Image (spheres, helix red, strand yellow):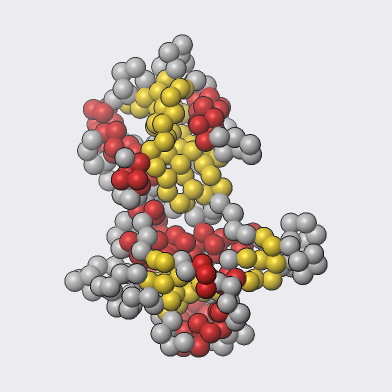
Amino acid sequence: MSFTFTTRLPLSRHAVDRDHLSRGLPGLLDQLWADAATRVLPVWHGKILLAPLDPGTGPRLALLPPSSLQMSPQNVGLRVYLGRSLPTNLPEAFGTRIVAVQLDDAAAARLEPDEDRWVGLRTVATVLGDRDAGLVTEALGVLNWHASHAHCPRCGAATAVEEGGWVRRCPIDNSQVFPRTDPAVIVLITDADDRILLGSNAMWENNRYSLLAGFVEPGEALETAVIREMFEESGLRVTDPVYVGSQPWPFPASVMCGFTARLADDQQARDLLPDGAEILALRWFSRQELQDAGEWMLLPGPSSIAHAMIERWLGAPLPAAPELIRP
């Protein structure tokens, strides 16, 4: 059940062999750069380019030969080997090797000066195919990690990029640092009447509501995090956390672990106590109330796991709502 649900999530889809065995090959990235069959995924401020629209195939990534960037291996920005393309029905042949490249402003302007053609993942996640959605999610996750791990956490020395962009090494003690992902739980809570609890975050518009979520702390099981985070944000004790599925969320470096839970028997649904710092408002919704609220309330956008979890409970599509662009 969980895996079936996960495959429906826009950012959990993939059709790439990450080819981890090739990452350790000496000079891998320079070899790929010299190979005309390699394709490059350019990334600029977390945005990517789309290929010219083909009505027969739908939106897809602009995967370019290295020569199109007009940059030597010595001058190109941070590169990450993403793996080999697996589909056989795309312009890139089966097995095509793909490299993500972080571009600075000048390089991005040379490649495509029209900034409107650079798009964020959230705005196109649901219209990209499995391979392209997975490629961008992978690329952003690793590049965001690089942005915050340029120095050794032990001594502060500038680290060197190795293993096709998947390792940083300290030149002082030769220690390695690997990409990190921060796990978070996101929870669909129901009460005795099978209503769901939605909250409004202090960083959002006051009419935007979603499921409650929070990061897993060190030394904590996912199920324990569900109980703790829900109490901290709502003042309610929940029980019976059940895993539903997960979705990577590279904004900047999370994986959202979806759970359902129910209100504990010794709790009243009216005993809501938003924390006042992160969560400003909380409300219970029946299915009919949620559908009726579409005229005034913004719900999670379709790229999020919250959107899919609510639809799963609702048993019907959610009212259309714009994506929350701010991380």
- Compared with 133, 52 (above or below) is below
Task: Give whichever of 254, 69 is nearer the camera.
Answer: 254
* Residue at 31% from the left image edge and 56% from the top image edge: 126
How many numbered circles does the render carry?
0
Q: Give the x, y percent position of residue 16.
A: 39, 66
Residue 200 visible from this viewpoint: no
Looking at the image, the residue that sits furthest to the left is 56
Task: Give whichever of 265, 35 is nearer the camera.
Answer: 35
Looking at the image, the residue that sits furthest to the front is 21
Q: Give the x, y percent position of residue 233.
A: 53, 29
- Compared with 305, 228 (above or below) is above
Q: Is residue 151 left or right of residue 76?
A: right
Q: Give the x, y percent position of residue 134.
A: 40, 61
Looking at the image, the residue that sits furthest to the top is 266
* Residue at 45% from the left image edge and 14% from the top image edge: 267
* Residue at 46% from the left image edge and 44% from the top image edge: 256
* Residue at 26% from the left image edge and 28% from the top image edge: 287
Residue 259 visible from this viewpoint: yes
Residue 91 in which image quadrant: bottom left
Q: Is residue 244 left or right of residue 313?
A: right
Q: Is residue 144 left or right of residue 205?
A: right
Q: Quadrant of the N terminus?
A: top left
Q: Give the x, y percent position of residue 249.
A: 47, 51
